[in-house]
Amino acid sequence: MRTSSASMVMGVLSWATVLLAQSEFEGLVEPVRDVLMGPPVAGRVATLYAGEGAVVKKGEKLLVMDDSIEALEVQRRKMVLEDQSDLLAAKYRKDLLKEDLESTRKLFESTASVSRDELARKEVEALLAEVEYNRMEQMERREQAELDIAKARLQQYVLIAPFDGVMAELSVDEGESIQAGQPVLRMVDLSSAFLLLNLPADLAAGLKMDEEVVLVFQLDDEVVKKGKVAFISPVIDPASGLRKVKMFFKNDAPKVEPGRIGLWVREGAAHE
């Protein structure tokens, strides 16, 4: 048993030594941003603005659900808010009664030509008019909030591109009904990418964040890109003794598609 365990340890050490001696390490290209998207509400797809492979800009519409009912609700709420006749009437009555109260109070104080009961009645009328106007103002604010809510609900029927990218997948057609939250399209940002590697733990530990690296890809011709260390996993895979590392690079032309194999060439190593 001891001999077997010792042999296993020696085998792992030998394997690690071989890996550490390598000058190139192979990894997989993955996009920095890759999202599955679907509307948060159920309904029927009314319009598709971009198909598979389309290049889209951040903020562009990708898909719109049938939002006719919600659009009518927004229109109704807007009409209610814009109708300020009750508020204007309440303000006019408040101002009129306030002015009347001030005149009555002056007469009461200067000539006593009006009774105290008459003054008290006008004070109550002015107070009630003030309360009614405040209530109408509060109603106006509530109507504005209800309009904002209706607009927000309407926006849930539109899928907007969250960044510049490419429509990588589309799994729905116009007229098709879908469930709330159902992923129906995939957007990928090809402007930058990661080379994902699994490196020997000691080698990965020797790297530094933002350290410059040289990455090589085989397209029609060999393509060399400069990158930097963007992520070093804080944990080691116990089965392999490897640590996950991501190396970021700007994916300028010629572009390297996600899913391709790439190489990290260690500094000072010769590459043929």
Image (cartoon, rainbow, N blue to C red):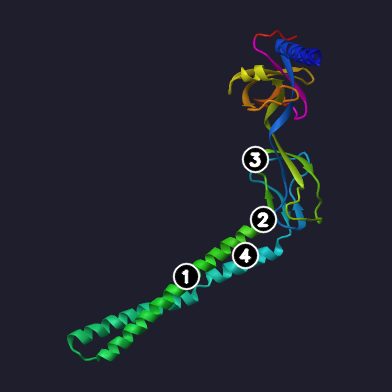
For marks 3 and 1, the one nearer the N-term is 1
In the rendered structure, find residue 156 and report the number of the disc placed on it: 2
Nearer the observer, 87 or 16? 16
Secondary structure found at label 4: helix
Tell me the quarter of the image containing the C terminus: top right
* 259 drawn magenta: yes
Extreme-front residue of the structure: 1
Residue at the location (28% across, 91% down)? 117
What segment carries the magenta color? 256-267
Q: Quadrant of residue 54?
A: top right
Residue at the location (64% across, 42% down)? 58
* 230 drawn magenta: no
Q: Which residue is mark 4?
A: 74
Nearer the observer, 167 or 43? 43
What residue type is disc 4 on? Val
What residue type is disc 1 on? Gln
Camera-side mark, 1 or 4 = 1
State if disc 4 and disc 2 touch (CB < 8 Å): no
State if disc 1 and disc 2 touch (CB < 8 Å): no
Does residue 153 lie above or below 218 as drawn? Answer: below
Cα distance between the residues tagged 2 and 4: 13 Å
Q: Which residue is mark 1?
A: 138
Lateral position of residue 4 relative to residue 57, left or right? right
Binning the other alpha carbons within 10 Å of mark 4 as few (below 14), some (14 to 19) or many (20 upward) gives many
Cα distance between the residues tagged 3 and 1: 39 Å
Q: How many marks do you count on the picture?
A: 4
For marks 2 and 1, the one nearer the N-term is 1
In the rendered structure, find residue 163 and report the number of the disc placed on it: 3
Residue 125, horizontal then vertical, whole percent: 36, 84
Secondary structure found at label 3: loop
